[in-house]
Image: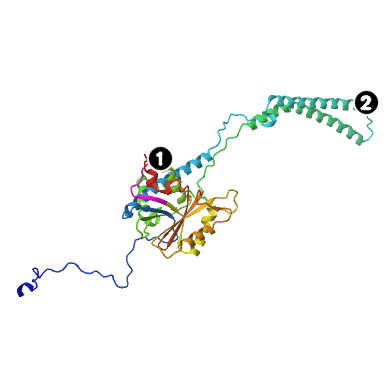
Amino acid sequence: MATENKSKPNSHPNKVNKKRKHYLPYNRPVKKGAHPLCPGVQGFFITCDGGREHQASHEAIDVIDSFFEEVVEEGIESKVEKLKPSVNPLNKITKFSYSDSSSSDDEDNDENKDAGDEGRRDGDELQKKNADEPVIAVNIDSRDETVSQNEDDASFEKKTQEIEEKPEDHLNQEAKAAVPRVKKQCVRTGTDESGNGSSLKLEKKSVDQLIEAELAELSDKGKRRFSKLDPACNGVVFIQMRKRDGDPSPKDIVQHMMTSLASTRKHISRFLLRVLPIEISCYASDEEIRRAIKPLVDKYFPEETQTPLKFAVLYEARANTGIDRAKIIGAVAKSVPPPHKVDLGSPNLSIVVQIVKTVCLIGVAERYKELAKYNVRQLTSVTT
């Protein structure tokens, strides 16, 4: 029995236990995501299935980029249509109000003829009066007067002849003025904007060089238009948008995405659920939210307006239990000026407030309930 109670010797005495305890390095922070979510960014707040954040982030960048290009193309086409000149052939004669019909031209000719006849009659009467009155050429002054009278008569006859010939010339001038002049295009000479006269050198790059430059820009993470940030929360993805001059806002891109998906019912993603536009991000506190939301309110809810809007506040919080929900909603609702009213049933615009840990993300959504709460999966699902 004693031999049975003895512990069995180790069959492999030289074998070393592979399980070792790993301790955190002393005085070093815990490793987090490469690009954590922080205040001061704008982009897209996306929900996905838990554990699929990596795949959803890559898919979201491709989907958002495609819809971004569509919005830009539509904006360019609308600008081109506005800049198109009206069709006006060069040989077309435009008629003005005073020369709308031929009758008006005839009336002008009759008036000019009447004026010429009256001028002739006045000239004949003056000549008769001068012939009846005796002319006494005693002084040099009286001679000058007679000469001046004769000169006046001659000039008057010339004027009457000009009046008779004027209608035809006048009509020719109107016809010439009616034909629009061909505008010459401004050709830029070889001078720069400073006017120094130096010739401009146009760099001609090949296709390979353009592709290399574009690849270099894409490889630089700081120059990418869309990049992912780590919110450090399960089931959540944030895509940052570096907005440049002339780019559409995140609201415009998401609005175009949802309306097109609702009309086409085309399946575009595998992991994405809701896509919300975010235009402002700050720390999750009452004071910071009131200060940061002012430009957004001025943009979408102006004080001086004849058509007040109805709005609603959509609040959600993740990984943060220390913040009061009522305070955040009250701070956002009170920042909107009084002409606009709160309507939770049928709002025109919805203010989206998403809190992820210590960061507050704010955006504006239009037709939120009509478009299935901006849920891509529900919009593209085929209902039978």
Q: Where does label 2 land, which residue?
A: 132
Q: Where does label 1 land, which residue?
A: 264
Q: Residue at x 89, y 25 (%)?
A: 128
User: Does dot 2 land on a helix, a strand or a loop?
Assistant: helix
User: Does dot 1 land on a helix, a strand or a loop?
Assistant: helix
Answer left or right for 31 relative to 123. Answer: left
What amino acid is found at the position of numbered circle 2 in the picture? Asp
Q: Position of residue 195 (x, y in %)?
A: 54, 51
Considering only vertical position in the picture, is 317 above or below 168? below
**Dominant SS in magenta:** loop
Residue farthest bottom in this picture: 2
Q: For the magenta stretch, what is the residue range?
A: 266-275
Circle nearer the N terminus (1, 2): 2
Screen quadrant of the N terminus: bottom left
Q: Residue at x 71, y 24 (%)?
A: 103
User: Does the stretch in magenta take in 268?
Assistant: yes
What amino acid is found at the position of numbered circle 1 in the picture? Thr
Front residue (pair 6, 306): 6
Considering only vertical position in the picture, is 313 above or below 151? below
User: Does the stretch in magenta take in 119?
Assistant: no
